[in-house]
């Protein structure tokens, strides 16, 4: 029997946080978000999230700590995991990738007040600057994960479902994921 675990990945601004929250609420599943875990880790260390990300570029132990937490979730059930590498550490999960064009991602992140508050230490002054930060972060993550695990988390072949979120509502994306997940469970 397949585990009842959905992993959701995608670049910043693709909607992983909002969508994972909605999917977990609709299915009445628990939710884990590695971004929340990272923010707590930064807070424990008395540094900003941006500083933690910068430290992670030179200190693989930070990524390994986060990844170990995700890996421990593999034994769970009825769970939605919002994490870039969850598909890798929970390979038997239903893996979803949310794709978005960088202009739309930047617009969303820049205009999302909650997101801006969470990331106040790296708040951009413009959508153009936000786009630059998103691309830099994605490239940094891609390089780190390649070096640590020899994987590219943006490669669509890792996923059971890819959804372009640019022109879809959260409700539509949530419904697509739940429909495809239920179909996947029956296979």
Image: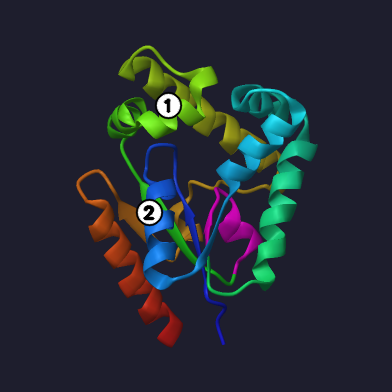
Magenta span includes 7 = no
Mark 2 → mark 1, Cα distance in angstroms: 18 Å
Q: Give the numbered dot on residue 116.
A: 1
Q: Which residue is mark 2?
A: 19
- Secondary structure state at the residue bearing disc 1: helix
* Residue 175 horizontal/vertical position (percent): 28, 66
Q: Relative to 186, is 75 above or below?
A: above
The residue that appears at 71% across and 54% down in the rendered structure is 69
Q: Relative to 54, is 1 above or below?
A: below
Q: Is residue 101 visible?
A: yes
Q: Which residues are magenta?
A: 80-91
* Residue 186 horizontal/vertical position (percent): 42, 87
The residue that appears at 41% across and 33% down in the rendered structure is 114
| Residue extending furthest toward the left | 167
Q: Pointer 2: residues within 10 angstroms few (<14), some, or many (20+)?
A: many
The residue that appears at 47% across and 56% down in the rendered structure is 8
* Residue 181 horizontal/vertical position (percent): 40, 73
- Rendered-image quadrant of the N terminus: bottom right
**Nearer the N terminus, badge 2 or badge 1?**
2
Q: Quadrant of residue 52?
A: top right
Q: Relative to 62, is 86 above or below?
A: below
Q: Is residue 104 left or right of residue 143?
A: left
Magenta span includes 82 = yes
């Amino acid at each position: 029997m397949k585990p009842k675990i959905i992993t959701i990945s995608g670049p910043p601004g693709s909607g992983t946080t909002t969508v994972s929250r909605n999917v977990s609420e609709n299915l009445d599943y628990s939710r884990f978000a590695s971004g929340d875990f990272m923010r707590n880790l930064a807070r424990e260390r008395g540094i900003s999230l941006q500083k933690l990300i910068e430290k992670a570029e030179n200190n693989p132990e930070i990524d390994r700590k986060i990844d170990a937490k995700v890996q421990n979730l593999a034994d769970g059930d009825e769970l939605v995991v919002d994490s870039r590498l969850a598909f890798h550490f929970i390979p038997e999960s239903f893996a979803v990738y949310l794709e978005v064009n960088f202009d739309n991602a930047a617009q969303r992140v820049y205009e999302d007040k909650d997101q801006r508050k969470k990331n106040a230490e790296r708040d951009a002054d413009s959508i153009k600057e936000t786009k630059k930060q998103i691309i830099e972060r994605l490239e940094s993550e891609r390089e780190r994960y390649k070096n640590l695990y020899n994987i590219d988390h943006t490669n669509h072949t890792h996923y059971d479902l890819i959804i372009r979120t640019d022109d879809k509502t959260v409700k539509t994306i949530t419904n697509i994921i739940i429909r495809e997940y239920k179909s996947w469970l029956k296979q």
